[in-house]
Image (tube, helix red, strand yellow):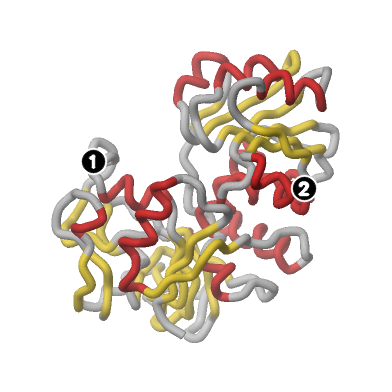
């Protein structure tokens, strides 16, 4: 199968397009023929060796944890799916090895769900990691219609998902972003606020009594969070473990078929869409990683693996 892979940690130049053996299909697994694979910052962070202290790598590594595709093979004792099912998956495994920037990927059914009918393949490819991260953050903070929610990094892949999910739950949403992304956030239903110096005053101007919930998807904003959080408020971050020192939650997203199914229901109900910044072919994965590393992509970069 065609795949982008690397033989040692490094920057984008370690990626090469090559032909690799097709992955095996174990019990409780499905093999997915990949149509689209979403790009996430964690992909190039793993490739740089930044997570080597947490996860073992088996080289050559095919990066990528997001996938939308079609079930090609069903493993032993896997009644949940049939060959031909259109699916999405957050395909993170226990070791870094057989990822989604390839024609085929296998994944346990614990992280696979049917593709939302309302989403295109491009949109579906960008849904799993960002959607689940946002959903699990808001679930952990028990966000409801009575809350005012502040989203740090509202225009990014995860942030834009969190804005939409919080709005679907009836919450009032404030989101930080650059001025260029304010119209985008307004369209998603959030009150936009410019990030950076003076952001505390700007947030207080629209939420004088503070906010009930803060979700941080960018890092480096703990002081802002604590300055605008109302008494008894809740906060969480995926980027800054120091929030544990101030009573917050720091977490990693987990594969979840149930969570993906919930995101699918929201998408099919018109409550959730996936902003796609660009779609690139498989052989341009290094260029996609370079763009992701710049940190100014609005929405998701998606890799088209097959038609």
Name the residue rendered at 63%, 61% in the picture: 274
Spatial CA distance of label 1 from label 2 is 39 Å
Q: Is residue 165 in view from this perspective?
A: no
Q: Quadrant of residue 23?
A: bottom left
Residue 186's label in the rendered image is 2
Task: Give the structural element (helix, strand or loop) at label 1.
Answer: loop
Given residues 205 and 4, the one toward you in this image is: 205
Between disc 1 and disc 2, whose residue precedes? 1
State the residue position of label 1.
52
Q: Residues within 10 Å of mark 2 (few under 14, many from 20)?
A: few
301 left or right of 27 in image: right
Tell me whether the residue at label 1 lies in contact with that at label 2, contact meaning CB atoms closer than 8 angstroms.
Answer: no
**28 or 163, which is in the foreground?**
163
* Depicted 65 relative to depicted 117: above or below: above
In this rendering, the label closer to the viewer, 1 or 2: 2
Residue 53, given in percent of the width and then of the height, sits at: 24, 36
Quadrant location of the N terminus in the rendered image: bottom left
> Residue visible at 59% across and 39% down?
153
Crowd class of label 1 (few under 14; some 14 to 19; many from 20; radius 10 Å): some
Disc on res. 176: none
The answer to whether 132 appears left or right of 283 in the picture is right
Q: Position of residue 224 (x, y in %)?
A: 61, 20
- Point 57% across, 22% down: residue: 248
Give the image location of residue 98, x and y in percent: 28, 64
Q: Which structural element holds mark 2?
A: helix
Report which quarter residue 136 is drawn in: top right
Q: Is residue 243 left or right of residue 185?
A: left
**Residue 188: image x %, image y %?**
75, 52
The residue shown at (27%, 39%) is 50
Q: Is residue 196 visible?
A: yes
Relative to 7, is 303 above or below?
Answer: below
């Amino acid at each position: 199968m065609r795949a982008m892979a690397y033989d040692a940690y490094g920057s984008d130049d370690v990626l090469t397009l090559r032909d690799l053996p097709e992955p095996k299909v174990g019990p409780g697994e499905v093999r997915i023929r990949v149509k689209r694979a979403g790009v996430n910052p964690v992909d190039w962070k793993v490739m740089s060796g930044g997570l080597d202290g947490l996860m073992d790598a088996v080289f050559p590594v095919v990066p990528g944890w997001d996938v939308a595709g079609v079930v090609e093979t069903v493993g032993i004792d896997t009644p949940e799916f049939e060959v031909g099912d259109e699916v999405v998956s957050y395909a993170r495994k226990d070791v870094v090895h057989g990822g989604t920037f390839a024609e085929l990927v296998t994944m346990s059914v614990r992280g696979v769900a049917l593709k939302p009918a309302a989403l295109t393949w491009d949109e579906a490819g960008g849904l799993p990691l960002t959607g689940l991260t946002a959903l699990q953050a808001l679930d952990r903070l028990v966000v409801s219609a009575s809350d005012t929610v502040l989203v740090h990094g509202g225009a990014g892949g995860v942030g834009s998902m969190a804005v939409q999910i919080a709005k679907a739950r009836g919450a009032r949403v404030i989101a930080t972003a650059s001025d260029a992304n304010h119209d985008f956030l307004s369209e998603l239903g959030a009150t936009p606020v410019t990030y950076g110096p003076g952001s505390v005053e700007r947030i207080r101007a629209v939420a004088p009594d503070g906010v009930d919930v803060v979700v941080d998807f960018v890092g480096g904003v703990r002081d802002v969070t604590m300055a605008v959080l109302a008494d008894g408020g809740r906060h969480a971050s995926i980027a800054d473990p120091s929030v544990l020192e101030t009573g917050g939650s720091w977490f990693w997203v987990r594969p979840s078929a149930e969570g993906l199914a919930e995101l699918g229901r929201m998408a099919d109900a018109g409550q959730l869409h996936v902003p796609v910044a660009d779609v690139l072919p498989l052989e341009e994965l290094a260029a996609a990683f370079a763009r992701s590393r710049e940190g100014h992509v609005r929405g998701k970069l998606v890799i088209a693996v097959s038609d």
